[in-house]
Image (cartoon, grey):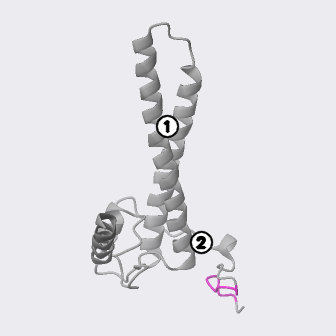
Amino acid sequence: MSGDTTAKDVSGHTEGANMKQEVFLPEDYRPAEDEPFMNERQLEYFRRKLLNWKNELLAGSRDTIEGLQDSTRNIPDVADRASEETDRALELRTRDRQRKLVAKIDAALRRIDEGEYGYCEKTGDPISLKRLDARPIATMTLEAQERHERREKVHRDD
């Protein structure tokens, strides 16, 4: 290719990603409606937001594993032991939900790399910046999500 560091090869991967300059992002940057949708700064903002979220979740998982390893002790009182088992089960369920969330974050990061981030998977319309800021793993516009949930509810009631 002619030196274009953002050209995509046949597999859809960005060529020259290693040479790609880091996008400057001011500390107080927030995506705005008056700039081009999903420009470099917006993509970098969401990439960093997703990576920070993922790192927080993974750190929490490490803490949970360490906590569970530390608390494997024999508790003689049946009520105390039951309470501890309940706490453990709840913690493990929470971590399982977070593990699934990490998979969704990874999928969002892939969409950023593939140039699909920020667009509804059902309609192709841009997802509002407010929605993406609140839920950066969103894959549908609010309207498409609501339609999807209504259809799901109807089918669940059958």
Residue 30 visible to the viewer: no
Identified by mark 2, the residue type is Gln
The residue lying toward the viewer, choosing from 123 and 5, is: 123
The magenta-colored residue range is: 3-10
Q: Position of residue 139 (x, y in %)?
A: 42, 72
Q: Secondary structure at mark 1?
A: helix
Residue 114 visible to the viewer: yes
The residue lying toward the viewer, choosing from 101 and 22, is: 101
- Please tell me whether residue 12 is drawn above or below residue 94 in the rendered image: below
- Marks counted in the figure total 2
- Please tell me whether residue 26 is drawn above or below residue 144 in the rendered image: above
> What residue sits 33% from the left and 70% below the top?
155
Q: Main secondary structure of the magenta part?
A: loop
> What residue sits 46% from the left and 72% below the top?
43
Left or right: where does residue 34 sit relative to residue 77? left
Q: CA distance from mark 1 to mark 2?
A: 40 Å
Q: Within the magenta stretch, is there residue 100? A: no
Of discs 1 and 2, which sits in the foreground? Answer: 1
Q: What residue is shown with label 1? A: 92
* Sequence-earlier tag: 1 or 2: 2
- Label ID, residue 47: none
> What residue sits 29% from the left and 65% below the top?
157
- Please tell me whether residue 54 is drawn above or below residue 128 in the rendered image: above
Q: Residues within 10 Å of mark 2 (few under 14, many from 20)?
A: few
User: Outermost residue, front direction?
Assistant: 158
> What residue sits 64% from the left and 79% below the top?
14
Q: What residue is shown with label 2? A: 21
Q: Secondary structure at mark 2?
A: loop
Q: Residues within 10 Å of mark 1 (few under 14, many from 20)?
A: some
Q: Position of residue 144 (x, y in %)?
A: 32, 77
Q: Position of residue 44 (x, y in %)?
A: 48, 68
